[in-house]
Image (cartoon, rainbow, N blue to C red):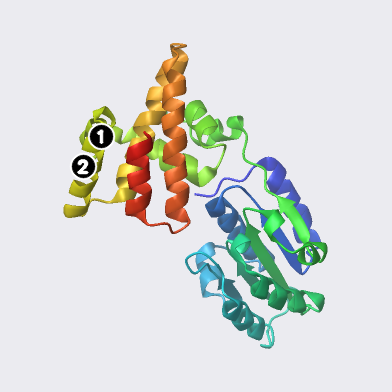
Amino acid sequence: MLLISDKTLKWIENYLKNPSHSLILVSRSSKDCNEIANFVAQRLLKLKSLAELEKYPFFFKVTRDKQNIKADDIRALIKTLKLKTFGDQSIRRICVVYDAQLLNNASQSALLKSLEEPPLDTVIILATTSLKKIYKTIQSRSTILNITRPSLVEFKNEFKDSKNVESFYSYTSGSVNEFIDNISKYEDLNDNTYIKTVKKFLAAGKLERLLMQDDFCNKDVSYEEILSTLKQVVYLAMQNTLLEKSEKSFFWLKYLSVIQKTEDEFQAGVSKKLSFTNLCLHL
């Protein structure tokens, strides 16, 4: 689902009237940023849907390979700029680099050369969670949009039938994809097959948690599902203690911080077993 703040949408509408050949989109949420990049690409090419965008012959994209984006992938993208496009509209080719914060030095150097003299029918979009990791020379040749998160009112209007919108809005910092993922899991939490395991895990001591982790491996249990359910339970416990103005809220906040660090390590490609072991020891 795509939910864009009114402020960001107005900026995009203005950009579409006079698009530059290089656009950098910046958002704390990688998924949100990538989806808005697709939305802008669709609008630039005047297509009716994302399905049409995926089939469009001159829509090219580069995605991450584990922890970075290879220079070879950027060079392959640059070769597509030599292809002759067809059609009557001014913008006929879109190149999107997702998770551009993972571009290494060689990749950015290769990309920079193309931005110096971009084809007139082309727009290159970089979707990134960190503007600091993009070369200043690339930034200077680009239009930059810092995506603003939808307001709480905009979330409430969109999710009228969902419970705890305000709590989850605060918890997810306004990230649309993270919000949808978490609130849907919350509403289905009672049906979660891992809920009993997670409650037992939280009540256990460090040694017992380590033994439980070995049991996870033997049963081929998803670390991601366990961690996600654990995060939900801890967050809801923290919310309850905050409402009660209990000192235990700091205790749950510490747990949430450790869980978030483990999630970040998962995304960075660190061994899941090693990361989960550290979690067992620090909860």
- Image check: 239 left or right of 95? left
Residue located at (73% from left, 53% from top): 145
Label placed on residue 221: none
Please, what is the three-letter code of the amino acid marked with disc 1? Phe
At which x and y percent is residue 124? 69, 70
- Residue count near mark 1 (Cα–Cα under 10 Å), binned few <14, some 14–19, many ≥20: some
Taking depth in this image into account, of 17 and 255 the one nearest to the observer is 255
Residue at mark 1 to residue at mark 2: CA–CA distance: 7 Å
SS at mark 2 in the image: helix
Label 2 sits on residue: 212
Label 1 sits on residue: 201
Q: Can residue 13 be seen in this view?
A: yes
Q: Is residue 19 above or below residue 28?
A: below
- Image check: 213 left or right of 264? left
Taking depth in this image into account, of 239 and 41 the one nearest to the observer is 239
Please, what is the three-letter code of the amino acid marked with disc 2? Met
- Image check: 162 left or right of 89? left
At which x and y percent is residue 214? 21, 48
Residue located at (69% from left, 87% from top): 82
- Do the residues under discs 1 and 2 have CB atoms within 8 angstroms? yes
Q: Can residue 162 be seen in this view?
A: no
Q: How many marks?
A: 2
SS at mark 1 in the image: helix
Q: Is residue 24 above or below residue 63?
A: above
- Residue count near mark 2 (Cα–Cα under 10 Å), binned few <14, some 14–19, many ≥20: some
Q: Is residue 48 above or below residue 61?
A: above
At which x and y percent is residue 29? 56, 49
Residue located at (56% from left, 56% from top): 35
